[in-house]
Image: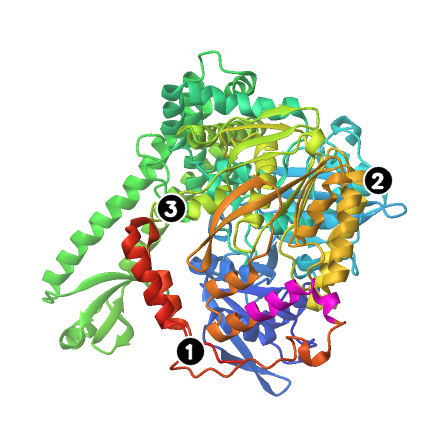
């Protein structure tokens, strides 16, 4: 996180009152940039200004002096602050908003304007639509240490009200971090956060002791004991209370609307460690992008809330078969009732993000547009409830129940709000004409004043014989007469006018009757704004009075959105509803990789493959060359489990999957130089995690165990790991390897089923068929893959020579018996001139020949021609 702390400056003896306030507030928030309100700007000073100017690419200026040096300063307009805040938050800064707490015009005497921090904006506590990513949750995660090694985790989303907890072990923490992908983390210094360490808050509040934490939680949710919400460990309660304390601190003591804390636990969720989540690219790719991910491949949702719910399902698949089938029933019913599904989609297209609008309103940052979002969402919910009136399955019946919010709220909002509603209340005209007679009267007075101004301007132009005279409003001077240079002297002679300000092309004049008119118009506008603000406050209170019901309605709309998206995914008939069982079955027919398939273009079809990991053949040993599709086959079956246990369709003709409790995927390891780990060390650490954690209900997919060391070491490690997975862990496993000698273990390991990726030699090269078939690869085809990759021909030929010699001698170990001069490793490659290489013309002619289209005579002629092109062997 960027360092936003300026050097500590004691208030100078001659500091202005405003700067004295700045010093005092900065001492309370040393780790945040201060957005210090001064008139129409938020100003930043000292190192705050330097950091913000660099991050925002705005001008850095200076104002006054401190300790004999100019004070660095920059600023942003208050009405455009959100855009600048978004850029700062994305860069990892925390920002304290310091507002003027009184009207400068109403101030008496020369006392400084009172200023206070009204909010601390951090990455995990934002609510503004412009600062949030609509399709992703914005999670604040708090961690607290309990007895022994127990860790309590509590996470909440201020923007939607989500609040959940879970106990985790240090070994499980990386998996939780990968699943939640928190925007901000509250953890004690020294907590191992791995790649998420940059998201830790710089100085989080220490969580309270267990008894104090339980009491604070009970008080926050107005219950006698939090046991009413479930069973919480002491560490969970401490983390939850710590998260609430932090949110209070950032919201100037207020709490947003939060759901009651839910002790989630981990028993009902599929366990995936951080390496598995990274390798499978479920929500984010390895490069941090979300373009080629499982989420992007299956997303058919129509709302931001639906996209967030879909992401949470994929990040945390279930292990409870009944819950999985409930989700399946919802989209299966919509698939069987396309007319209803279409009407649901039509309703969803009208539904804004009610959950986040409600979140902003609960912390006093809602505007007219948020009220309009609630109105539109409730109308969409009412339409959907009518659509679901035809005996849907239990999961959609629950949705229909949750959609039933008091219709009086939508009616009141619809009657009151103007269309379209303005973004901010200060913009005015948020309430439609005719709704409130008092507001209409004040607006009429204000509008009538405008008519009076127009008539007065015409009258004065005639009286003073200045045709282009204008009456304008000035921020400091109020209403004034503006006249061009040619008329200034004539107006200065008028006894009822006073010169107020000269201009480059004219002058401004005032008068007592203009000042009185200014007062009358201003008062009318202020009274209209005050009345409109009061009406908006009443509507907000009406909505917040039913906040829980509206939040449940928003959740129901999101569920319906995910269900219709799954139905749309399955509609073409190429995705199936998997059968979920409680045994160890695993059979997928014609399975495909959803992300690879979605990325194919130009009419290229994905080659589907079966996978059978039934108990009697639960370990599939997969051999074959690189580029043949081994890694794709591994990942597609792991992703099938994620999709199936998320309750979604699977890209296959048919699938039967016994519930998997833990999923391990070790495909494509890389080094971790920051922690001093080589690629091979990372591979061994991940392998150790698999051997310690996998069990009979787990699924393990591993690729190239042992490739990062010598051939014999790698073969020995792969052999031992294979035996352990088969006989000790007894997990359903797909084990891809280049050590095709391991296929011989099928005679000793009864549940080992050797398979290979089919290839076809053709024209001196090899064609990958991307098909998985029983059997073992006879060779690795590495030299051919090198040729396909564009390795220079001389290198490919040399590699082929070395390979043939080593194969003839039984491999590298046997070469040690040969004299060193005879080893191909030490035999120099023959020098070949680039312009002429012996045999290349004959090889080219052979490649160009098409035997299937030749007559016997043509084939014989071609053979003679090729013979003539070959070099004459030297006589011995």
Q: Which of marks 2 and 1 is nearer the N terminus?
A: 2
Relative vertical location of residue 74 with respect to residue 714 in this rendering, above or below: below
Quadrant location of the C terminus in the rendered image: bottom right
Quarter of the figure with the N terminus: bottom right
Circle 3 sits in a helix, a strand or a loop, which is it? Answer: loop
The label nearer to you, 1 versus 3, is: 1
- Visible in this render: residue 287? yes
Judging depth in this view, the residue of 448 and 316 nearest the camera is: 316
Asked whether the beta carbons under mark 2 and mark 3 sit within 8 Å of each other, the answer is no
Residue drawn 18% across the image and 53% down it: 454
Q: Quadrant of residue 196?
A: bottom right
Name the residue beneath numbered marker 2.
234
Q: What stretch of residues is rendered in magenta? A: 800-815
The residue where tag 1 is placed is 837
Instruction: Tell me the residue that label 3 is attached to.
Output: 604
Residue 715 position (above or below residue 60) = above
Q: Quick one: 685 or 346, which is closer to the camera?
A: 685
Q: Distance between the residues labelled 2 and 1?
A: 77 Å
Instruction: Name the residue located 38 percent from the left edge and 46 percent from the top edge.
Output: 604
* Secondary structure of the residue carrying numbered label 1: loop
Disc 2 to disc 3, C-alpha distance: 56 Å
Q: Where is residue 814 shown, x and y percent of the image? A: 74, 66
Above or below, 626 against 749 in this view is below
Residue 305 lies in the magenta stretch: no
* x and y percentages locating residue 99 in the rendered image: 55, 58
């Amino acid at each position: 996180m960027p360092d936003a702390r300026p050097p500590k400056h004691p208030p100078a003896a001659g500091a202005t009152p405003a700067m004295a306030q700045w010093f005092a507030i900065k001492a309370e928030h040393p780790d945040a940039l201060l957005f210090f309100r001064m008139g129409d700007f938020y100003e930043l000073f000292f190192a705050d200004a330097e950091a913000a100017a660099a991050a925002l690419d705005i001008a850095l200026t200076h104002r006054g002096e401190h300790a004999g040096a100019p004070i660095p300063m920059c600023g942003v307009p208050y009405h455009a602050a959100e855009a600048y805040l978004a850029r700062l938050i994305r860069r990892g800064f925390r920002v304290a908003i310091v507002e003027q707490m009184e009207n400068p015009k109403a101030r008496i005497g020369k006392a400084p304007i009172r200023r206070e921090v009204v909010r601390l904006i951090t990455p995990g506590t934002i609510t503004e639509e412009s600062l949030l990513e609509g399709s992703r949750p914005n999670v604040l995660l708090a961690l607290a240490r309990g007895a022994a090694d127990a860790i309590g985790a509590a996470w909440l989303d201020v923007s939607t009200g989500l609040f959940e907890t879970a106990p985790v072990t240090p070994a499980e923490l990386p998996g939780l971090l990968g699943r939640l992908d928190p925007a901000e983390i509250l953890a004690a210094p020294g907590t191992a956060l791995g790649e998420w360490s940059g998201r830790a808050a710089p100085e989080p509040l220490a969580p309270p002791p267990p008894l104090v934490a339980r009491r604070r939680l009970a008080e926050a949710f107005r219950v006698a004991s939090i046991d009413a919400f479930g069973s919480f460990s002491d560490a969970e309660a401490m983390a939850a209370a710590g998260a609430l304390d932090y949110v209070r601190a950032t919201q100037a003591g207020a709490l947003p609307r939060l759901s009651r804390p839910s002790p989630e636990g981990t028993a009902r969720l599929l366990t995936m460690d951080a390496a598995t989540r990274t390798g499978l690219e479920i929500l984010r790719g390895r490069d941090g992008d979300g373009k080629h991910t499982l989420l992007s491949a299956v997303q058919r949702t129509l709302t931001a809330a639906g996209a967030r719910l879909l992401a949470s399902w994929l990040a945390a698949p279930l292990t409870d078969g009944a819950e999985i089938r409930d989700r399946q029933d919802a989209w299966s019913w919509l698939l069987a009732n396309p007319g209803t599904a279409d009407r649901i989609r039509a309703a969803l297209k009208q539904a804004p993000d009610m959950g986040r609008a409600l979140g902003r309103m609960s912390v006093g940052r809602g505007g007219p547009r948020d009220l309009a979002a609630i109105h539109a969402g409730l109308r969409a919910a009412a339409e959907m409830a009518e659509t679901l009136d035809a005996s849907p399955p239990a999961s959609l019946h629950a949705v229909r129940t949750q959609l039933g919010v008091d219709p009086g709220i939508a009616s009141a909002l619809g009657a009151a709000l103007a269309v379209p509603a303005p973004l901010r209340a200060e913009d005015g005209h948020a309430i439609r004409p005719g709704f409130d007679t008092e507001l209409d009267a004040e607006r009429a007075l204000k509008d009538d004043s405008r008519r009076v101004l127009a008539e007065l301007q015409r009258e004065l132009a005639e009286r003073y014989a200045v045709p282009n005279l204008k009456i304008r409003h000035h921020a400091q001077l109020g209403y004034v007469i503006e006249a061009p240079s040619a008329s200034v002297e004539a107006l200065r002679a008028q006894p009822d006018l006073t010169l107020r300000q000269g201009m480059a092309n004219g002058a401004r004049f005032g008068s007592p009757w203009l000042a009185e008119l200014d007062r009358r118009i201003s008062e009318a506008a202020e009274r209209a704004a005050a009345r409109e603000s009061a009406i908006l406050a009443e509507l907000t209170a009406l909505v917040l009075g039913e906040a829980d019901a509206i939040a449940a309605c928003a959740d129901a709309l999101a569920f319906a959105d995910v269900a219709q998206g799954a139905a749309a995914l399955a509609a073409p008939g190429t995705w199936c509803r998997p059968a979920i069982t409680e045994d160890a079955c695993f059979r997928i027919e014609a399975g495909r990789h959803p992300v690879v398939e979605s990325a194919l273009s130009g009419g290229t079809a994905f080659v589907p493959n079966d996978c059978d990991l039934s108990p009697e053949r639960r370990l599939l040993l997969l051999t074959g060359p690189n580029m043949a599709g081994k890694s794709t086959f591994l990942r597609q079956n792991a992703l099938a489990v994620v999709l199936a246990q998320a309750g979604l369709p699977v890209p296959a003709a048919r699938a039967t999957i016994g519930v998997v409790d833990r999923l391990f995927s070790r495909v494509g390891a890389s080094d971790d130089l920051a922690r001093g780990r080589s690629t091979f060390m990372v591979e061994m650490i991940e392998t150790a995690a698999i051997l310690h954690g996998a069990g009979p209900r787990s699924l393990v997919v591993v690729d190239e165990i042992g490739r990062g060391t010598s051939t014999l070491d790698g073969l020995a490690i792969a052999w031992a790991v294979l035996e352990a997975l088969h006989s000790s862990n007894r997990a359903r496993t797909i084990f891809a390897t280049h050590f095709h000698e391991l296929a011989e273990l099928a005679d000793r390991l009864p549940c080992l089923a050797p398979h290979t990726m089919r290839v076809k030699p053709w024209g001196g090269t090899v064609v990958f068929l991307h098909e998985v078939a029983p059997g073992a690869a006879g060779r690795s085809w590495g030299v051919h893959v090198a040729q396909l990759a564009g390795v220079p021909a001389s290198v490919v030929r040399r590699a082929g020579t070395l390979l043939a010699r080593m194969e003839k001698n039984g491999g590298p170990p046997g070469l040690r018996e040969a004299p060193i001069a005879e080893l191909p490793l030490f035999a120099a490659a023959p020098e070949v001139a680039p312009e002429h290489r012996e045999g290349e013309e004959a090889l080219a002619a052979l490649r160009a020949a098409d035997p299937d289209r030749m007559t016997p005579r043509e084939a014989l002629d071609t053979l003679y021609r090729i013979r003539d092109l070959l070099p004459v062997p030297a006589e011995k």
